[in-house]
Image (spheres, grey):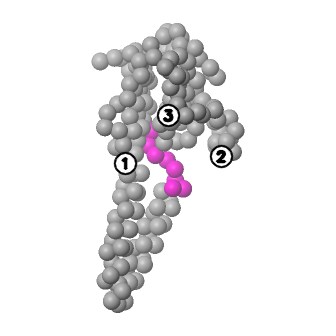
Amino acid sequence: MAKKIVKVEERFNNIELVAVFSLLFVLLSVRFTQQQLLATHEATASAEAFTLALLLVGGALFILWRLRMTITLHQKGISFKISPLHTKKYKIKWEEIEKCQLVEISKSAEWSGWGVPHLDRRERVFSLCGKTGLYIKKKDGEVLFLGSMQLSGYQDEIVKLLNQKNIPIEGL
């Protein structure tokens, strides 16, 4: 097993989306309770629809609560996984990487769209936290963005590791 240089774990942290799903869950629950208390013939027919909607919204909340991304930089390369969506770790060997860039974009720039690297069809984004993280261009032309707010705290270790592996660094 390769020696881990940097390991970060990021949870889903979009409070606005969680709040919207939570509010929707509460409103559906209140409406469902009102219909059951009135106990009309329509209430029994729509009880299944409300139950299904509650299960879907509750399931979405559960998945958002469980989402976490793990990024590991080690001597052999970079590995990452978004649980529970990925069943295995994705691995990138240092030999496959053409260049890297540590991207730090403020919230205002993130919302406006300024400061975002140009994305093309071959780019794959793996992020739970917006547009701050590691921008990787592979030798085969594939571009990956691994989003993590915590990677900027390990800038010195990342620069040292990339220099050891002779990988060009942009934006650092």
Q: From mark 3 to mark 1, how far is it between C-alphas?
A: 22 Å
What residue is shown at x 47% (from left), y 36% (from top)? 126
Residue placed under numbered mark 2 in the picture = 111
Can residue 24 be seen by looking at this rendering? yes
Q: Where is the C terminus found, in terms of image quarters?
A: top right
Q: Which residues are magenta?
A: 10-17
Can residue 145 be seen by looking at this rendering? no
Q: Nearer the viewer, mark 2 or mark 3?
A: 3
Quarter residue 135 falls in: top right
- Pointers 2 and 1 in contact (CB under 8 A)? no
Left or right? Give the position of 172 relative to 17: right
What residue is shown at x 36% (from left), y 58% (from top)? 59
Mark 1, other Cα within 10 Å: few <14 / some 14–19 / many ≥20: some
Mark 2, other Cα within 10 Å: few <14 / some 14–19 / many ≥20: few
**Label whose residue precedes the other's in the sequence (2 or 1):** 1
Residue placed under numbered mark 3 in the picture = 124
Q: Nearer the viewer, mark 2 or mark 1?
A: 2
What residue is shown at x 60% (from left), y 30% (from top)? 103
| Foreground pick, 7 / 90 | 90
Residue placed under numbered mark 1 in the picture = 66
The percent position of residue 125, horizontal first and vertical second, equals: 50, 36
